[in-house]
Image: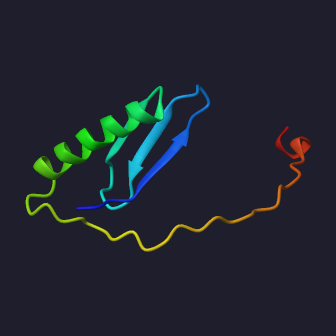
Amino acid sequence: MKFGVFIERDREGNYVSSVAELPGCHAKARSIDAVMTKILDAVDTYLDVENHDNEPLYELVDIKVIDVPKKEIDLAAFR
């Protein structure tokens, strides 16, 4: 089976991975190699516990990148 894995880096420099088709299936590590090892284990555990037929709950269709303009915030309005 193939799954889409998102890999992000948090503010502390850790890599965080998520499996798009398996809600709640995440892993965190200090390197990409380590996070990939951990996410493979997480997927295996997820399928054993949550999904007895070993089929994805969702299908990853596409990933889009959007550009959202930065907004100026008037901090005086919050005082």
Q: Residue furthest bottom?
A: 61
User: In the displayed structure, would residue 69 be above or below residue 14?
Assistant: below
User: In the displayed structure, would residue 14 be above or below residue 6?
Assistant: above
Q: Quadrant of the C terminus?
A: top right
Looking at the image, residue 39 sits to the left or right of residue 51; the answer is right
Q: Position of residue 64 (x, y in %)?
A: 59, 68
User: In the displayed structure, would residue 44 be above or below residue 55?
Assistant: above
Query: Could you say which quadrant of the image residue 42 lies in?
Result: top left
Looking at the image, residue 52 sits to the left or right of residue 21; the answer is left
Residue at the (89%, 52%) spot, across then down: 72
Residue at the (91%, 41%) spot, across then down: 76
Residue at the (14%, 58%) spot, across then down: 51
Q: Position of residue 77 (x, y in %)?
A: 87, 46
Q: Position of residue 12 (x, y in %)?
A: 58, 25
Q: How many marks?
A: 0
Q: Residue furthest front?
A: 33
Nearest the eye: 53 or 30 = 30
Q: Residue furthest left?
A: 52
Q: Quadrant of the N terminus?
A: bottom left
Query: Could you say which quadrant of the image residue 36 lies in?
Result: top left
